[in-house]
Amino acid sequence: MSYQIDKAGSPARVTASERRVLLRYAFTAIAEAVESESHAGISGRLSDLGEGGCYFEVMNPFAVGDNVRLHIFRDDQEFTAKAKVLYSTGGIGMGLAFTDIEPTQRRLLDRWIGERSGELTPDRRVAEIEQEIRDSGSATHQQRNVLNELILMLIQKRVLTDVEGKALLQKLLL
């Protein structure tokens, strides 16, 4: 039989419908949560993570039903999402269910889960990085335009020959 702590601080039984449906994976990261109404913040450590939520180890967890903004920090990356406290075990931690995740944040979450589940192999990780570079194509396009102009200026000022400039421009277009 499982119990949780409700908003009044009393133990309440966890029903089968409240138990998690999605898999969670062992995952260690530093995290912060800010309660939506009071703006109270707490810091702690995550011990597991899944598509639907995580377990946040903290000495003084928020009450069941509280809405929070969660920040997870790992490997120089930050994941942010809105979440709700599904269960709270006083002095140990709380189970959080994600309620709102931005698309860019969803990709980071999926990557972390993929790494932990073994679904994301190194080759697939490289492919994801290449896709992120393609997604940021507008910045790359602007950089190419600047390089193109620079090469043309160097040709005009006779720093580069026409042949050298043409070769550089062809490399730039590949």
Image (cartoon, grey):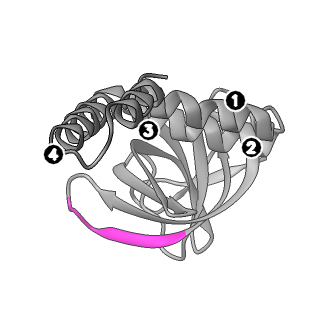
Foreground of the two, 5 or 71: 71
Nearer the N terminus, badge 1 or badge 2?
1
Q: Which residue is mark 1?
A: 22
Tag 1 near tag 4, CB within 8 Å = no
For badge 4, the amino acid type reads Lys
Question: Which of the labelled discs sits on residue 105, or is there none?
Answer: 3
Nearer the N terminus, badge 1 or badge 3?
1
Above or below residue 44? Residue 134 is above
Picture quadrant where residue 22 is located: top right
Tag 1 near tag 2, CB within 8 Å = no
Nearer the N terminus, badge 1 or badge 4?
1
Percent position of residue 54, x then y: 60, 48
Nearer the N terminus, badge 2 or badge 3?
3
Q: Of discs 4 and 3, which sits in the foreground?
A: 4
Q: Of discs 1 and 2, which sits in the foreground?
A: 2
Region rendered in magenta: 38-44
Neighbour class for label 1 at 10 Å: few (<14), some, many (≥20)?
A: few
